[in-house]
Image: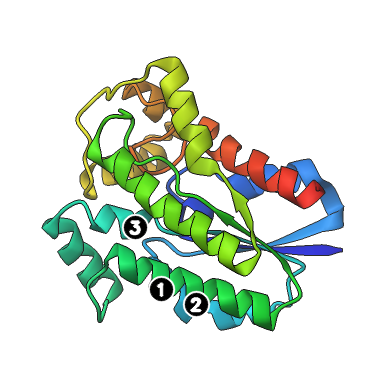
Amino acid sequence: MTHIVCLGDSHTRAQVGADYIKMLRKRLGAAYSFTNAGVNGDLACNALQRLDSVIDARPDIVTVLIGTNDANASLSETNVQMMTKMKKLQVRPTIDGYEENLRALTERLVKETDARIALLSLPVLGQDPGTLPVRRAAEYSKVVERTAAEYGAAYLPLYERQLAHLESTGAKDGIPFQDGKKLSSRAAMQHFMLFRSFDAISRSRGLELTTDFIHQNTRGATMIADLIEDFVRD
């Protein structure tokens, strides 16, 4: 049996958005086992700190989807303070720090496992391609691309695929981008207390890929699953 570890943040944990690992389990079948190594709110530094458990699992394949919280923190001083408090950060989150942590994480996976490794670029932040959050996700995704090339890992272009979708549909913000917790909290409340699907919440807000500009709806999560499935089967 092929063992796949998916390392990441809330996109991977899938408590507040669509579950791409569930999709992969259904598609790939009993020949593959999965470990969901996603932790809500994690930055790259947090993923690096808990990498021992990934290595100890002796995976055949590791996928890494991390960086949304690093990029989101860069959008405002309020977000810096929120992430610092929530994750007890010792160092201010920056794009240089993100690159350092992602490189260290990837280097350990290459040196300490025999796994095939794939790094995914970030999901698009926000919805309007001309706005700062979308551009910021592009900047962090370039870091992922450089790191994958440096260490011989596969690069899975999630950002590029999602941006192409937004551009092809002419999508614009249904509501102004919100980079804090309020929109996500309201989505979680509607889902868990009112039993609304994440996709219904997404549609009501006029969003193409997310429920709250960050967490994925089924369309967004399917793009993640598609890229990983192609990598696994290659």
Q: Please tell me which residue lies in front, 34 or 133.
A: 133
Q: Please tell me which residue lies in front, 65 or 86.
A: 65
Q: Earlier in the sequence, mark 3 or mark 2?
A: 3
| As drawn, 80 above or below 141 | below
Q: Residue at x 82, y 48 (%)?
A: 29
Horizontal side of 37 relative to 35 (left or right) equals: left
Q: Check disc 1: other Cα within 10 Å, few if <14, some if 14-19, many if 20+.
A: some
Secondary structure at badge 3 equals helix
- Where residue 142 appears, as percent x and y from the top left, is 44, 52
* Amino acid type of the residue tagged 3 in the rendering: Asn
Q: Mark 1 to mark 3: distance in Å? A: 15 Å
Circle on res. 173: none
Q: Mark 1 to mark 2: distance in Å? A: 6 Å
Marks 2 and 1: in contact by CB < 8 Å? yes
Q: Which residue is mark 1?
A: 100
Q: Which residue is mark 3?
A: 69
Q: Please tell me which residue lies in front, 19 or 102.
A: 102
Secondary structure at badge 2 equals helix
Q: Please tell me which residue lies in front, 191 or 137.
A: 137
Q: Which residue is mark 2?
A: 104
Quadrant of the image occupied by residue 169: top left
State whether residue 37 appears in this view.
Answer: no
Q: Quarter of the image containing the N terminus?
A: bottom right
